[in-house]
Image (tube, helix red, strand yellow):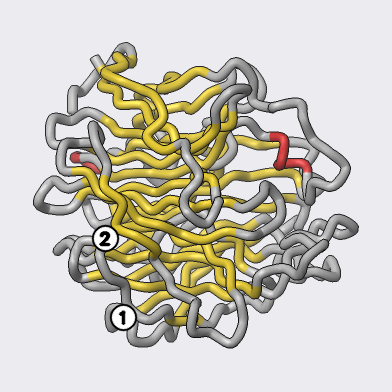
Amino acid sequence: MISSPRKIDVISEGYFLTQPDEKGGCPRNCRITLLPNNTLVVSVIFNLGVGTGLIYSRVFSSKDFGKTWKSLGMMCDWSKSEKEYSERLNISRTPHGKLLALGMLYETPAAGTTYYARETGGAADTSLFFTTSDDEGITWSQPQIIAMCYPEPPEVGGVICATRQGRWLAPFAPWLDRHGSWPNRGKAAVMISYDRGKTWTSSAAFLSDPSGTVRFQEVWVEELSDGRVVGIGWQQERSGDRDYPNAYSISLDGGESFGPTLSTGLMGQAVAMRALEGGRVAVVYNRRHENPGVGLAIARPDHRGFNVEFDGLAWSAQSGFRGEVKDEEAIFWADFSFGEPAVEVLPDGSFFVVFWCHEKNVQGSRYCHVRLV
């Protein structure tokens, strides 16, 4: 990692998944991690209709740093279940290479309904859950529910942060329920496991807006090289009419507690992080309005400020919106043209960024491989 980057150099970019699978789902949201043997693994959400909530998760791996990908199959098998479930899973790993996946689990919406209620914007009954893999993503454990500290449905954009001390942190933001009830609006929290997922007996709030006028989405936590834990999230006016700079907070005790909610100064939406050397962090985030695309920033956060050292566009979009919202779509974000970026740092110090994209002639899971020079 160079100390004073001046610009982004694009090594390669394009789609790595575009075709529907055998079930007819289209690839979209993705999360990425690098195993100790330099195998890249991505979790990909396959969608059977934007806004419907009919989704499931698959996993892919690459032995050549993203040039070619191999499908490893479904992450959950509900074929023997009495009910039909939908789920979305986001992949990460422990320091020793065990794969973890955190996500949202709910009953598949009945025909003619959607996951989000059009009248209230509230979500269906949803559980926070996780699964693990010890064989690089080929097989996955029986999914386990994580009891939450808030009663509302969880909104999950991030991954399990497995600290070097063995603690697992599962971040989420409470979302309003189907009826519009939202007692814990303006909060984000981590559920904490001290025994590597066997039990989740504690929690900690890491983003908070006491006024209740702000909502947090796509929240993420990451352990830095010096042992501090940073939480970050998309900060939006409750009505959805206005975005604020991404918010963050810092924990000095491994995620047991967090300091005040502060501003990163990065004017973005969905956001993800990856720790770098020297207490730095690489942040990728959406820009949907002015100068749209996927931003990449390098920062050295502390309790006084986020201390952004570099901020640029890793990928530029023609527009942040498709301009094709139809009345039957469940919610306004069905019109977004790209979103939910994630980033991994490769051994040569370059950055592999993944995100979903929906352009006029193609849609799917996209990537850009860049370096800072």
- Left or right of 96? Residue 175 is right
Q: Does residue 223 sit above or below 360 in this rendering?
A: below
- Left or right of 55? Residue 240 is right
The kind of residue tagged 2 is Arg
Residue 335 x/y as whole percent = 72, 35
Identity of the residue furthest to the front in this view: 22
Q: Nearer the viewer, residue 361 or 217?
A: 361
Residue at image location 38% in from the left, 44% down from the top: 273
Numbered circle sitting on residue 175: none
Residue 329 x/y as whole percent = 79, 46
Q: Can you tell which quarter of the image residue 17 is in?
A: top left
- Left or right of 346? Residue 236 is right
Residue 251 appears in the figure: yes
Q: Earlier in the sequence, mark 2 or mark 1?
A: 2
Evaluate if marks 2 and 1 touch, with contact meaning CB atoms under 8 Å apart: no
Q: Residues within 10 Å of mark 2 (few under 14, many from 20)?
A: many
Residue 163 appears in the figure: no
The kind of residue tagged 1 is Tyr
Q: Report the residue marked by disc 1.
A: 194
Q: Report the residue marked by disc 2.
A: 93
